[in-house]
Amino acid sequence: MLEMHGITKSFDAVKALKGASLSVKPGEIRALLGANGSGKSTMVKVLAGLVKPDGGEITIDAKPVHIHSSRDSAQLGIATAFQDLSLIPTMSVLDNIKLGRETVRRTGTIDAKKDRRDVEDLLARFHLKCDPDAYAQTLMPSTQSMLEVAKAVFARPRLLLLDEVTATLHQDEIEVLFQILQELKAEGVSIIYVTHRMKEIAQLCDSAVIMRNGETVCELEGDELADLDQIVYYMTGKYPEKSQAAQAAQASEPEGEPVLAVKDLKYTPKVRGIDLEAYRGEIVGISGLDGQGQSEFIRLLLGEFHAESGTIVYRGKETAFKNPAEAVANDVGFISGERNREAIFDRRTISENLYVGASARGGLFRFIPNRKIQEFSRKAVEKYNIKIGRIDDPASSLSGGNQQKLVVARWIAQMPDLLLLDDPTKGVDINSRREIHQILRDCARQGMTVVVSSSDNDELMDLADRIYVFYEGRVSAMLSGESKTQERLVAEMMGVSRKGGSENA
């Protein structure tokens, strides 16, 4: 159906694509894999009409085509759902979906009732319980992501491009999405699926194409999709180190006084009475389906939100930070997975982005020599293996994985006593994710207390010593040692408590 051959694209001195190729058959779900910066997102943008290639050929049904704009892409039957959403925040759900596709009567007027029925049917298919008249910006991140896919599916495409659409989704939402994709596949729709969640590949895809450094390095099919170590090798050029999940499962029980002790914390409506403890040198995981209070809890600890009742004891003293700046001044760090919205100053330089954590600890109106900023930043870039051009390039010049490593380095370099992370590796390639995990383990060994919320169960199983499972604003279980299994974790996330052998909080 689709074939791309010899695609090249340069952005100034950076060669994003170096003769890359990609093909997909009718009714095939093909994964497009690669580390951040490999060129896969550029390939998707070429097909979406957002990037014009410098060279190469694109054919659909064996006929050459030219895609110069998103209109060209749509006219060829291509629809795209992006990780960086294309929704218009200040428009309603209905208007976002129907924009440019309104039902027009013979009289030339819009059939508003038909449009509403269409949107309500689409929302029901995606199990989205939201008001068609609600503004997109008021919806939960996972709902916005599902709406982005629904909008693309509503276009009835021949070729559907999905770029990291499950990055903010939780397991129940992913199951709904996968069922819809299988239905589209049965209808003959071709699907190109970009993901960093490796276990989704064997679960969903028929085949995979792997890119590295702007080139297509291999194609995989069938049982080859289940060999994650081999996939990592093709993506990075080296085999991964063995997982430390077994080591984490055998971790000893924490001793001494907790660095952080939370008791009956409440913040209506999402946090309804949370108890949690975190000890020095420990990585504590927070899990749960979307909207169970995880992000709100992290921000209560940070001082962005203020609890209605309950206590937070930090370093032996009852604490209620007035704002995040006060938390930072008391050796608390925060890393967000929403890097574009909460972490990266994309137009500022790499060095400025790195040093902003250190500058936040000092007083206002103080002079900071540029030499000090440059020296600090170069050390951080080297220590944390951040791939950059020049230290004075804007942060937007980095790939997603390197942007996130920049945010991690910003705070790790301060060595806070308590590090809070909210879905820190969302949309990050598997190699960068492993590097970030190793950084966090090293910090814990040096005595840092790490509390990490994640939508990725595999990440928490691999990284955390203990996992608190949130369900409807409360802790349904605390899993550690032998009780920390995928089966127990999923059961507790769904509210299916199995107290036999568990450690319920």
Image (cartoon, rainbow, N blue to C red):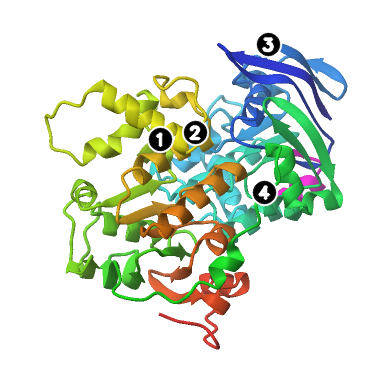
Left or right: residue 267 compared with residue 150: left
Between marks 4 and 3 in the image, the one whose residue lies nearer the viewer: 4
Within-10-Å neighbours for mark 4: few <14, some 14–19, many 20+? some
Q: Based on the picture, tell me whether residue 198 belongs to the magenta stretch.
A: no
Provide the residue designation for mark 2: 386
Provide the residue designation for mark 1: 380
Rendered residue at 60%/43% (across/down): 431
Query: Which sits in the foreground, 44 or 39?
Result: 39
> Going from the N terminus, do you reach mark 2 or mark 1 first?
1
Q: What is the three-letter code of the residue carrying label 3? A: Asp
- Tell me if residue 413 can be seen: yes
Q: Residue furthest bottom?
A: 500
The stretch of residues the image draws in magenta is: 181-191
How far apart, in angstroms, are the residues tagged by discs 1 and 3? 35 Å
Provide the residue designation for mark 4: 240
How far apart, in angstroms, are the residues tagged by discs 4 and 2? 18 Å
Rendered residue at 49%/63% (across/down): 464
Circles 2, 1 touching at the beta carbon (< 8 Å): yes
Q: Based on the picture, tell me whether residue 188 belongs to the magenta stretch.
A: yes
Quarter of the image for residue 483 reads bottom right
From the top left corner, tell me how far across and down residue 102 is, in percent. 56, 32
> Going from the N terminus, do you reach mark 1 or mark 4 first?
4
Rendered residue at 13%/37% (across/down): 363
Within-10-Å neighbours for mark 2: few <14, some 14–19, many 20+? many
How far apart, in angstroms, are the residues tagged by discs 1 and 4? 23 Å
